[in-house]
Amino acid sequence: MPSPFGRLTPRERELLFKLVAIPVLALILFYAEVWTEHASAIMIYGRF
Amino acid sequence: MASTLAGSGMVWILLVVGAILVQALALRDRRLALSLVILNTVALHWGLGLSWPALASLAAGLAWIFLGLALTRGLASRRPGAAALIVFLPLFSLWFLARRVPIHPTGGGALLFAGASYALVKAWTFIKDVQDGKARTWDSRIAVAYFLHFPTFQIGPMHLYGEFETALRSPRRLGPGDLVDLTYRLLKGLVKVVFLAPLLKPYSLLAFSSLAEVPPASLPLACIVFSLLLYLDFSGLSDISCALSGLMGIAAPENFRSPFLAADPAEFWRRWHMSLTRVLTSYIFVPLSRILTGRMPAVLTAALATSVAFLLCGVWHGAEPRYLLWGLWHAAGVFAAGRMGPTRSRSPLRKALCVLGTFLFVSAGWIFFAIPLAPPGGGGKP
């Protein structure tokens, strides 16, 4: 059975991947504040 | 500042909405640069938390640049390098002295805003470009917008004035695909900074308050993990900056290109913090090499110009001797790589060994960079 995504161009596939990834990343971010100290290490230097 | 940058979801939502608003307004408002100046000031103060004294010191710096450029116009036509230094050195001196003042809300440290180091580098490239004639027709409103551009203000990537002006005069109209790309990049950057990098912190050099506290057996792993942490953190912040700038229709230069695939230290710097590397190369190394060429043997010219560029790179990262050591470490690596020539081996094993060796070289260099060599008040270096 041919893949439903078989006719997509590489750009369309990339956009589809990103559209799926966006809510996943948002979900990770939603919970990240619980899991980590969420402080940027580079800003520890703080005087840039 | 860290919590402002990465901790508050509300701040990010406001910044994204602000960026889209700026994009919408900028494309319609004929007084493009002026609207950007106002909106960037609002974003810097209420979004990124720059105090009014800090903004005032930034404004004073800009006023000096404009005044200095006007005063040295005659000299610039005869001796552009000297004219550029006359305008820049007072800024550099004040920045250097201010970095040594402890941060206190009511003290002098409050005048040194987060992002001052990036503004300083942009000041040098801008002044040099104007004095050299590359940006002869600069516009003061666009220059202010250039220095205040909030998406890249605190952590880069740093535009050159010419590319910023070009982007500003023809801002890109965003299509649906662009919005997907930029939203994905923004979230990817946030996940790197807020989630992935902090997970590595307990295993990195940042788990210790000084190098003297790191058990020798843990040191190699702590350095390697710090490399990965810093990459995730810094490239994540660059992703965020590029995405926000893109949402405003102003493309930002890229800062990273798979740096840990570099086969020698010179290639590493062509892939790591690229917007700084081009400044070190084009605005310090090349002019200095031109001055030194003919006055000493070529090998000494290369060694001296490389050392000066990386020592300045070290000073820029911090006003402590350990940053100078870190700069010298990389200067030695880049100079040695230059003497040995590019890695052209077709052997995959040899290439892999070069990549691994470069990664270990870079990771070892963080010993000087990441944490103090000795505990505060704990005596000399180990």
Image (cartoon, helix red, strand yellow):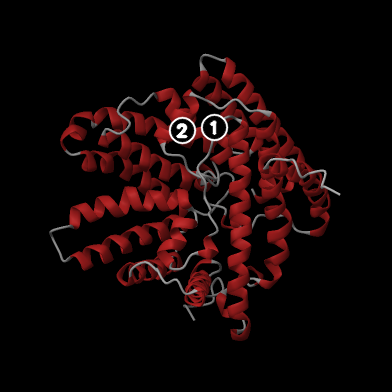
Position of B134 compared to B20: left or right?
Answer: left
Query: Dot 1 falls on which chain?
Result: B
Query: Who's the residue at 71% across and 45% down the image?
Result: B187
Position of B13 compared to B290: left or right?
Answer: right
Q: Percent from the top left, x then y, of residue B188?
A: 69, 49
Residue B15: quadrant of the picture? top right
Label 1: which residue? B250
Residue B338: quadrant of the picture? bottom left
Between disc 1 and disc 2, whose residue precedes?
2
Name the amino acid, label 2: Phe
Residue B269 against residue A2 in the figure, above or below: below
Position of B85 compared to B230: left or right?
Answer: left
Position of A31 compared to B100: left or right?
Answer: right
Query: Dot 2 falls on which chain?
Result: B
Q: Nearer the viewer, residue B317 or B335?
A: B335
Q: Is residue B312 visible?
A: yes
- Are dots 1 and 2 on a single chain? yes
Name the amino acid, label 1: Ile
Q: Secondary structure at mark 1?
A: loop
Label 2: which residue? B164
Whether the residues at callouts 1 and 2 have beta carbons within 8 Å, the answer is yes
Cα distance in 3D space between marks 1 and 2: 7 Å
